[in-house]
Amino acid sequence: MEIKNVEKQKTLMIRMTAPAAKLPEVMGEVYGELGAYLGRKGIAFAGAPYAMYYNMDMDALDVEMGFPVVSDDKGEGRIRNGEIPAGKVASTVHVGPYAKLEDSYSSLMAFVKEKGLNVTEWMYEYYLNSPVEVKEEELRTEICYPIR
């Protein structure tokens, strides 16, 4: 667990509402669509894919999925430009299956409470590696809660 400063990052993303149970399928589709768009436009990635969660309604998650990018681009269709804001975040890296992320969220929230931090209602995750490339127990997901 740590508190760190993050720089603003330009992104290209798709924001939608989806049930948590469908998220793996939806994410595969969205990241594929974004990757194809970036490739077609010659836009370079500037970091790991991310998902920003604006609520915790498991039946209707308001989620933004995207990639940090180095250049400005307006997007097209449902692809939009956006940003991950600069500022301080409370952060931890979860190692293991996505199904166990809740454990790391609980630990991070205990850290936030212990430090007396005031965090936003929304948070984001970076997917530091892929379930296509590593075993489930080796997945690395960075969780970030912006501090107000």
Image (cartoon, helix red, strand yellow):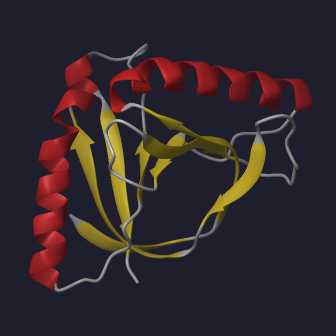
Residue at the farthest front position? 59
Residue plotted at (29% across, 83% down): 118
In the depicted view, which residue is nearer to us: 130 or 108? Answer: 108
Q: Quadrant of residue 13?
A: top right
How many numbered markers are drawn? 0
Residue plotted at (38% across, 18% down): 131
Residue plotted at (72% across, 48% down): 69
- Taking the image as shown, residue 19 lies to the left or right of residue 82, namely left
Vertical arrangement, residue 108 with respect to residue 142, above or below: below
- Taking the image as shown, residue 50 lies to the left or right of residue 89, namely right
Q: Can the viewer see residue 97 in this picture? A: no
At which x and y percent is residue 7? 58, 70
At which x and y percent is residue 81? 77, 52
Residue plotted at (77% across, 46% down): 80
Q: Quadrant of residue 135?
A: top left
At which x and y percent is residue 97? 22, 27
Viewport quadrant of the C terminus: bottom left
At which x and y percent is residue 46? 67, 47
- Taking the image as shown, residue 93 lies to the left or right of residue 34, namely left
Q: Can the viewer see residue 132 in this picture? A: yes
In the depicted view, which residue is nearer to us: 86 or 59? Answer: 59
Vertical arrangement, residue 88 with respect to residue 84, above or below: below
Viewport quadrant of the N terminus: bottom left
